């Protein structure tokens, strides 16, 4: 398990992870290995992660550590922030007809007859576009504690799912009475009603429309909200820079969700250390 945490922090492949353990004394020290010990090879690392994925253990591990952080008083519960980030995967080189069938929820007949080819095809990842740039893969939807910047809930979807669609699955009973911060992608009546239903205070950015631009007061309100909302960008910035980007090399949403869960857990571990966490 420690190997998987190291792997996510450095975002390297199983083969490179095996090499890094053999090559770096710092990795060996963290894992409690000596120069005389046997190092798990790439296939062993892959198999262990597959077992965690198959049994749905990753989310349980994430929640287990989160409960530990709560007992230490690191999750402050004085406001929540929601946002989403792209998790890209290797692009699939499919024909137009194959992509059409995949979007319809079907598997191309040729792939059905070739299980080895099908095993290498991701039928869950999707394309989407943001600010003129195209992305292929999945999305990591997170809800973070506004003060500690710890992730306390996450969901994983394909990249085409709009950020706001995962708002309700992210909210919990324990969020009642707290302020909810988000950018203008989460604005609109349906989300506002959802926030009210969950008895939270709406601090979502307001959005201007054609022939109905934001007033000076609304702009000032958004500016005030931004001081808190922007803290979630620090989370994605850490994953992008310190953890060498959220790009992953997996196939299928089940594996992607497991790896993203490990990624979020790894972030929380490092953030907890920054906040002074000690297991002693």
Image (cartoon, rainbow, N blue to C red):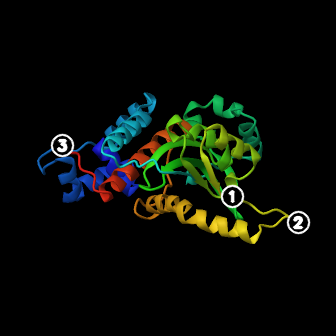
Q: Is residue 70 above or below residue 232?
A: above
Of mark 2 and mark 1, the one earlier in the sequence is: 1
The percent position of residue 216, horizontal first and vertical second, equals 74, 72
Instruction: Residue at 23% x, 55% y: name it.
Output: 27
Of mark 3 and mark 1, the one earlier in the sequence is: 3
How many tags in the picture? 3
| CA–CA distance in space, label 2 to label 1 | 17 Å
Which structural element holds mark 2? loop
For mark 1, does the 10 Å Cα neighbourhood hold few (<14), some (14 to 19), or many (20 or more) residues? some
84 or 219, which lies in front? 219
Q: Do the CB atoms of the residues marked 2 and 1 lie less than 8 Å apart?
A: no
Residue bearing mark 2: 211
Q: Is residue 185 above or below residue 110?
A: below
Which structural element holds mark 1? helix
Query: The C terminus is located in which quarter?
Result: top left
For residue 123, side relative to residue 119 (left or right): right
Which structural element holds mark 3? loop
Instruction: Residue at 57% x, 54% y: name it.
Output: 85
- Residue 261 appears in which quarter of the rendering? top left
Residue extending furthest bottom? 216
3 vs 1, front mark: 1
For mark 3, does the 10 Å Cα neighbourhood hold few (<14), some (14 to 19), or many (20 or more) residues? few
Instruction: Residue at 64% x, 56% y: name it.
Output: 135
Q: Is residue 251 above or below residue 203?
A: above
Residue 38 got which mark?
Answer: 3
Of mark 2 and mark 3, the one earlier in the sequence is: 3
The percent position of residue 234, horizontal first and vertical second, equals 47, 62
Residue 184 got which mark?
Answer: 1
The percent position of residue 274, horizontal first and vertical second, equals 32, 59
Q: Do the CB atoms of the residues marked 3 and 1 lie less than 8 Å apart?
A: no
Q: Is residue 211 visible?
A: yes
| CA–CA distance in space, label 3 to label 1 | 52 Å
């Amino acid at each position: 398990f420690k190997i998987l945490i190291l792997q996510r922090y450095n975002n390297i492949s199983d083969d490179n992870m095996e090499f890094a353990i053999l090559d770096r004394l710092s990795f060996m020290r963290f894992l409690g290995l000596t120069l005389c010990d046997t190092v798990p090879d790439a296939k062993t690392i892959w198999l262990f992660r597959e077992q965690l994925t198959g049994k749905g253990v990753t989310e349980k591990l994430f929640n287990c550590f989160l409960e530990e952080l709560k007992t230490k008083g690191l999750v402050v519960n004085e406001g929540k922030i929601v946002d989403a980030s792209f998790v890209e995967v290797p692009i699939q080189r499919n024909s137009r007809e194959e992509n059409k069938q995949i979007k319809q929820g079907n598997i191309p007949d040729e792939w059905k007859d070739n299980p080895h080819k099908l095993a290498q095809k991701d039928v869950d990842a999707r394309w989407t576009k943001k600010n003129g740039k195209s992305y292929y893969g999945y999305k990591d939807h997170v809800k973070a504690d506004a003060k500690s910047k710890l992730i306390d809930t996450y969901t994983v979807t394909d990249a085409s799912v709009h950020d706001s669609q995962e708002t309700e699955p992210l909210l919990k009973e324990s969020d009642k009475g707290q302020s909810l911060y988000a950018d203008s992608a989460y604005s609109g009546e349906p989300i506002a009603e959802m926030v009210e239903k969950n008895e939270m205070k709406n601090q979502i950015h307001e959005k201007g429309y054609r022939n109905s631009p934001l007033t000076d007061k609304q702009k000032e309100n958004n500016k005030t909200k931004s001081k808190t909302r922007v803290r979630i960008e620090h989370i994605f910035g850490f994953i992008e820079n310190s953890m060498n980007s959220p790009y992953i090399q997996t196939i299928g949403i089940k594996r992607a969700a497991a790896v993203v869960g490990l990624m979020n857990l790894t972030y929380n571990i490092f953030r907890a250390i920054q906040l002074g966490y000690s297991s002693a």
